[in-house]
Amino acid sequence: MQKVAIYPGSFDPITNGHISIIKRALKVVDKLIVVVAENSEKNPLFKIEERVKLIADLGIENTHVKSFKGLLVDCAKQENVNIVIRGLRAVSDFDYEFQLALANRRMNRELETVFLMTDYKYSYLSSSMLKDMAKYGGNIEGLVPENVKNKLKERFLSYGDN
Ligand code: COA
């Protein structure tokens, strides 16, 4: 039987840090559903459809991308999946992730969250930091795939050459 997991996040936008988690997750599961979810606390730069497209265009094998509005547990149920992948960058991520995993497990006892450590090269990286770097002309080479770099460039055209 195929082992399938979901990897949820805001992905606003996807970075090489997320991609490294996707690739490593695919070493433990056969198929990964990347779920671009709404986080009600955030005000995203890219529309959910744009975020989905940026990931889908990467064409990562054994990966399917979709958007979801609502509770993660409902998304998992809809996809018939019991494994959630989350990346941990540093100890500072732990409190929030612990809270999220426990809240999800309270709503669905079958749901297991599996944490993978983010590649040390990207352990400081976040989508917000990346957007700031891109906005003010910082060098984002090596931090995002080419399509994301171009999309950021297009969005922040008036701010610099990056
Ligand atoms: N590489 C680079 N950056 C990483 C990373 C990695 N490996 N892992 C995490 N991050 C960054 C993200 O870029 C993001 O940065 P940002 O805050 O600047 O945007 C940050 O870490 C954490 O974001 P993310 O992993 O996208 O999680 P999130 O907190 O935005 O969203 C959801 C988490 C979508 C899974 C969660 O909000 C959710 O499940 N929402 C649905 C409602 C629900 O069910 N809530 C829970 C029960 S009440």
Image: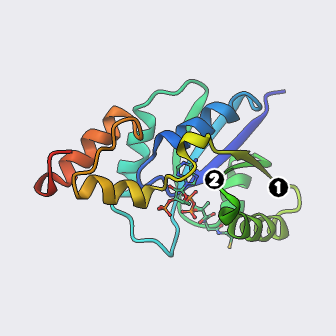
Residue depicted at x 41% and y 51%: 13
Instruction: Tell me the element at label 2.
Output: loop
Q: Position of residue 70 (x, y in %)?
A: 59, 67
Q: Is residue 120 visible?
A: yes
Nearer the observer: mark 1 or 2; the answer is 2
Is residue 84 toward the left or the right of residue 63 in the image? Answer: right
Quadrant of image for the C terminus: top left
- State ligand 1's quadrant: bottom right
The residue that label 2 is drawn on is 89
Q: Considering only order in the chain, which callout, 2 or 1, is on the residue closer to the N terminus?
A: 2
Q: Is residue 65 visible?
A: no
Quadrant of image for the N terminus: top right
Q: Quadrant of residue 107?
A: bottom right
Q: Position of residue 138 (x, y in %)?
A: 27, 50
- Callout 2: CB less than 8 Å from ligand 1: yes
Q: Residue furthest top?
A: 61
Residue depicted at x 66% and y 63%: 93
Is residue 161 toward the left or the right of residue 67 in the image? Answer: left
Q: Position of residue 16 (x, y in %)?
A: 48, 39
Label 2 CA crowd tier, 10 Å (few <14, some 14–19, many 20+): some
Residue 54 vs residue 146, the one in the foreground: 146
Q: Amino acid at mark 1?
A: Leu
Q: Position of residue 73 (x, y in %)?
A: 72, 61
Label 1 CA crowd tier, 10 Å (few <14, some 14–19, many 20+): some
Q: Amino acid at mark 2?
A: Arg
Instruction: Tell me the element at label 1.
Output: loop
Numbered label attached to residue 111:
1
Residue depicted at x 55% and y 40%: 121
